[in-house]
Image: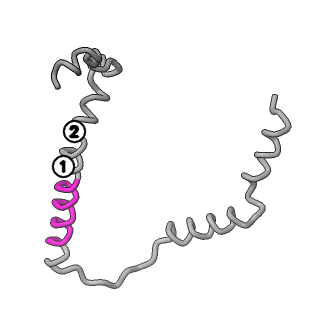
Amino acid sequence: MLRQNQVRNLRFISFSSGAFPTALLAFLAIATPSPAYAYIDAGVGSMILQLLLGGIGGALVVLKLYWHRIKRVLSPGSDEEKPQPAESELHKEQ
């Protein structure tokens, strides 16, 4: 059973503001094929290869930067933290 405030929130999701016709028109414009009278030369293939290699390289750099965080999340027992030294031990080091 929906509460009254949940029913009020559902009214904001409605497509009466024109979002649905706009989304439908955008979908039909993208989904409708049209002939492209274009020439694809050999340079386009090398650009696509460069784009793919650059994307893979960028993904590897991001993976390297965040590797420790990813490893901590995926490793079992990651919720446990290292024990902190007692306050008396901190004063001994100084």
Mark 2 lies on residue: 67
Where residue 47 sits in the image (x, y, percent)?
18, 72
Mark 1 lies on residue: 60
Q: Quadrant of residue 5?
A: top right
Nearest the viewer among 84 and 33 is 84
The relative height of residue 25 versus residue 54 in the rendered view (above or below) is below
Q: Residue drawn at (24%, 31%), measured in percent from left and top?
A: 71
Where residue 11 sits in the image (x, y, percent)?
79, 50
Badge number at residue 49:
none
Q: Where the N terminus falls, by quadrant?
A: top right
Does 92 appear in magenta? no
The relative height of residue 69 versus residue 89 in the rendered view (above or below) is below
Residue type at numbered disc 2: Trp
Q: Residue drawn at (29%, 17%), measured in percent from left and top?
A: 87
Q: Nearer the viewer, mark 2 or mark 1?
A: 2
The local secondary structure at tag 2 comes to: helix
Residue type at numbered disc 1: Leu
Where residue 10 sits in the image (x, y, percent)?
76, 46
- Categorize mark 2 by other alpha carbons within 10 Å: few (<14), some (14-19), many (20+): few
Q: Residue drawn at (41%, 79%), measured in percent from left and top?
A: 35
The relative height of residue 58 versus residue 6 in the rendered view (above or below) is below
Mark-to-mark CA distance, 2 and 1 = 10 Å
**Residue span colored magenta:** 45-58
Q: Quadrant of residue 20?
A: bottom right
| Coloration of the structure image | one colour
User: Which callout, 2 or 1, points at the residue further toward the start of the chain?
Assistant: 1
* Residue 40 placement, left or right of 12: left
- Categorize mark 1 by other alpha carbons within 10 Å: few (<14), some (14-19), many (20+): few
